[in-house]
Image (cartoon, rainbow, N blue to C red):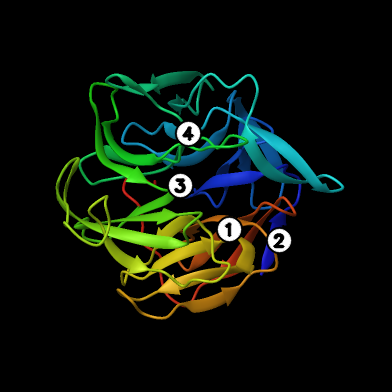
């Protein structure tokens, strides 16, 4: 494992770029940054609130799930943990950053009558639409149920596709785009749905009230954050408290454990010329690291 940089605050939402740099959000610093191959960190834009998941869209801009902000808990001399909804919280949004001008635009902050509560992560389909999770917000004595949305990249349409989830976080598509994966943090489960078209999934009557099929449920202390998929279709999940990335090669299969030395492995993505570099954000020690992976990761739509 190579440490690319430790000059961050609470990194997440990373994008491997063709020039070898990595774009990521720094949630606690409320910003979008670029990490160069030599470890230098450049500020791209300030993104007020809680910038979380990020992805390159069909127009070359960076699309960001902004959860609106949380209280930060210092657990160990500057090592941060996320807390409940912060006092000045005003809502969540999907924001867009132009990499040339650093201009930040708010694309969505509601779906019909419902305000977005805590957008968390996103993935683009081949047609240029985005699937994103809304984790909701946690307060001192209650929390929101979450949802999955599909939205057009030009701001013209947003629809709620899946509701009633408990802390939906990481989201990914299978290599052929026919399966949608969603990780729930607090339950430690990954659900899947058959994709029938842009913003459409097939829902089952059982076992999930949200209509998904249970893809993985390791149990124990497992909490999931971000997801990434390999070219072969394996689903890789950042496992927060397990100090690991868990790899699943099919429904119900036991996890292949890839140890990563940090208490908060929050997200991962694949990059490099052969797509065998796995970049991961380690948010307890606020580091971006790079691991050699045993097979190529999936090249995301519009990633270049």
Marks 4,1: beta carbons within 8 A:
no
Foreground pick, 36 / 243: 243
Which residue in the rendered view is the most extreme toward the right? 77
Identified at 65% across, 22% down, the residue is 87
Give the residue at mark 2.
Answer: 3
Identified at 49% across, 48% down, the residue is 17
Marks 3,4: beta carbons within 8 A:
no
How far separated are the C-alphas under marks 2 and 1?
A: 10 Å
Tag of residue 118: 4
Tag of residue 188: none
Classify 168 as above or below 274: above
Q: Nearer the viewer, mark 2 or mark 1?
A: 1
How far separated are the C-alphas under marks 4 and 2?
A: 30 Å
Callout 2: helix, strand or loop? strand
Q: Which quadrant of the rendered structure holds the N terminus?
A: bottom right
Earlier along the polypeptide chain: callout 3 or callout 4? Answer: 4
Q: Is residue 3 left or right of residue 49?
A: right
Marks 4,2: beta carbons within 8 A:
no
Give the residue at mark 3.
Answer: 167
Neighbor class of circle 4 (other Cα within 10 Å; few <14, some 14-19, many 20+) is: many
How far separated are the C-alphas under marks 3 and 2?
A: 30 Å
Callout 4: helix, strand or loop? loop
């Amino acid at each position: 494992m190579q440490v690319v940089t430790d000059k961050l605050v609470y990194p997440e939402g990373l994008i491997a770029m063709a020039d070898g740099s990595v774009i990521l959000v720094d949630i606690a610093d409320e910003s979008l940054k670029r990490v160069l191959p030599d470890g230098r960190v450049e500020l791209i834009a300030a993104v007020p609130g809680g910038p979380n998941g990020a992805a390159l869209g069909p127009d070359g801009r960076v699309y960001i799930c902004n959860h609106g902000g949380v209280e930060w808990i210092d657990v160990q001399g500057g090592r941060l943990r996320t807390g409940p909804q912060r006092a000045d919280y005003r809502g969540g949004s999907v924001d867009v950053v132009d990499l040339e001008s650093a201009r930040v635009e708010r694309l969505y902050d509601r779906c019909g009558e419902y305000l977005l509560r805590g957008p968390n992560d996103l993935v683009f389909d081949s047609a240029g639409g985005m699937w994103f999770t809304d984790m909701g917000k946690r307060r001192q004595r209650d929390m929101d149920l979450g949802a999955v949305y599909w939205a057009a990249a030009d701001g013209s349409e947003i629809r709620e596709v899946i509701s009633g989830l408990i802390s939906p976080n990481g989201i990914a598509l299978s290599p052929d785009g026919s399966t949608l994966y969603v990780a729930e943090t607090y339950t430690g489960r990954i659900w899947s749905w058959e994709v029938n078209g842009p913003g459409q999934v097939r829902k089952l009557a059982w076992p999930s009230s949200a209509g998904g099929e249970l893809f993985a449920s390791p149990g124990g202390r497992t909490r999931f954050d971000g997801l990434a998929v390999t070219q072969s279709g394996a689903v890789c999940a950042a496992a927060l408290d397990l100090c690991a990335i868990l790899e699943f090669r099919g429904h119900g299969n036991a996890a292949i454990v890839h140890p990563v030395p940090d208490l908060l492995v929050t997200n991962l993505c694949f990059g490099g010329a052969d797509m065998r570099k796995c970049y991961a954000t380690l948010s307890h020690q606020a580091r971006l690291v790079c691991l050699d992976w045993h097979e190529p990761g999936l090249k995301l739509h519009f990633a270049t």
